[in-house]
């Protein structure tokens, strides 16, 4: 093992397997970082560039933007639950997105499907189900029968016997069909 010592304690170790340990003398992977709050800061080095931080504590892994001089948490992955937070450090669901606009409409989630190769019709859907069969539940879809999403329609589906059935449609003119 090779050890780098500062202030009388080992700051970094390279072991016989070429694993590197920072804050530990027994690294368990290619790079092991140990400490009260193990962290990695990434900066390109040019003035004004973003500086990113990856850190963890006893409850979560955090990704933060550090360029402002403060820690702006962008994403959190909670230990134990696997909950992911975007814009929050305490996600209360598998995916918890918190925006920053107060008193305004903010796009918090975008699901996009590019035009198919023939350029004739495309769409995207969001399926909500609580069974192992992904064809049982409800579905909300965006659909266009023409090229480049002209005349988009919003479709609502429910399922029966593992088949989705369109129950309502709002067309591009705002007309509702049930």
Image (cartoon, helix red, strand yellow):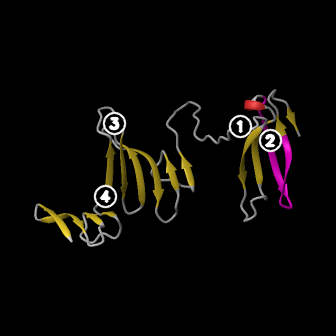
Determine which residue is flagged by label 2. Answer: 155
Question: In the rendered structure, are the residues bearing label 1 and label 3 in contact, judged by CB atoms less than 8 Å apart?
Answer: no
Q: Secondary structure at mark 2?
A: strand
Q: Quadrant of residue 113?
A: top right
Q: Report x, y in % for residue 2.
A: 19, 68
Q: Is residue 107 above or below residue 160?
A: above
Q: Report x, y in % for residue 154.
A: 78, 38
Q: Residue at x 31, y 58 (%)?
A: 37
Distance between mark 1 and mark 4 Cα atoms: 45 Å
153 or 43: nearer the viewer: 43
Judged by depth in the image, the label closer to the viewer, 1 or 3, is: 1
Residue, far front: 118
Q: Quadrant of residue 57?
A: bottom left
Q: Report x, y in % for residue 175.
A: 85, 30
Q: Is residue 122 above or below residue 85?
A: above
- Tell me which segment is drawn in magenta: 151-168
């Amino acid at each position: 093992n090779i050890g780098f010592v500062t202030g009388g304690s080992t700051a970094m170790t390279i072991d016989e397997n070429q694993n590197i340990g920072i804050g530990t003398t027994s690294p368990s992977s290619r790079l092991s970082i140990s400490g009260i709050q193990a962290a990695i800061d990434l900066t390109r080095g040019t003035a004004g560039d973003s500086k990113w931080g990856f850190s963890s504590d006893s409850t979560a892994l955090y990704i933060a933007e550090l360029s402002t001089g403060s820690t702006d948490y962008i994403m959190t992955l909670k230990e134990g639950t696997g909950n992911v937070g975007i814009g929050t450090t305490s996600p209360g669901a598998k995916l918890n997105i918190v925006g920053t606009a107060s008193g305004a409409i903010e796009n918090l989630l975008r699901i996009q499907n590019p035009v198919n190769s023939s350029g004739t019709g495309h769409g995207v859907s969001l399926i909500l189900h609580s069974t192992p069969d992904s064809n049982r539940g409800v579905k909300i879809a965006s659909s266009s029968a023409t090229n480049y999403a002209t005349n988009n329609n919003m479709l609502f589906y429910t399922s029966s016997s593992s088949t989705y059935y369109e129950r309502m449609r709002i067309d591009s003119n705002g007309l509702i069909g049930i």
